Image (spheres, rainbow, N blue to C red):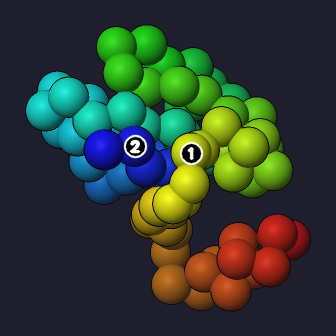
């Protein structure tokens, strides 16, 4: 399975590691490029933006938002 993860805080990064360890391909994006770089490799592909993340996903696209509740709407709208 391939999925995109937006938000690589403590929970998001942990989920990506577990998914990648189980053989899933994860495309990751975060406002902190260092967080993306830390996870890249071994089944994890970094994205530089939300547009880049969507472009790297194959249909049907699965995107998991792991961001604070107050930011969810802004992330979905791309702000």
Q: Which mark is residue 58?
A: 1
Is the residue under label 2 in contact with that under label 1 (CB below 8 Å)?
A: yes
Q: How many marks?
A: 2
Query: Marks 1 and 2: which is nearer the front?
Result: 1
For image coordinates 74% across by 43% down, the residue present is 55
Question: Where 35 sits versus 72, above or below?
Answer: above
The N terminus - image quarter: top left
**Circle 1: is it few (<14), some (14-19), or many (20+) Cα within 10 Å?**
few
Question: Where 53 sits versus 6, above or below?
Answer: above
In x, y percent, where is residue 38? 48, 20
In x, y percent, where is residue 69? 51, 84
Under tag 2, what secondary structure?
A: strand
> Which of the pair 49/61 is nearer the observer?
61
For image coordinates 64% across by 79% down, the residue present is 71
For image coordinates 68% across by 86% down, the residue present is 73
Report which quarter residue 56 is drawn in. Answer: top right
Question: Where 43 sits versus 54, above or below?
Answer: above
In x, y percent, where is residue 79? 86, 71
Name the side, left or right, on which 42 lies relative to 54.
left
Q: Which mark is residue 2?
A: 2
Q: Earlier in the sequence, mark 1 or mark 2?
A: 2
> Which of the pair 79/47 is nearer the observer?
47
In x, y percent, where is residue 62? 47, 61
Name the side, left or right, on which 40 lies relative to 43.
right
């Amino acid at each position: 399975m391939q999925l995109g993860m937006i938000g690589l805080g403590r929970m998001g990064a942990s989920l990506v590691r577990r998914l990648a360890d189980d053989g899933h391909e994860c495309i990751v994006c975060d406002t902190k490029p260092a967080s993306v770089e830390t996870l890249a490799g071994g089944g994890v592909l970094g994205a530089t933006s939300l547009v880049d993340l969507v472009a790297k996903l194959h249909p049907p696209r699965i995107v998991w938002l792991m961001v604070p509740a107050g930011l969810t709407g802004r992330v979905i709208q791309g702000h």
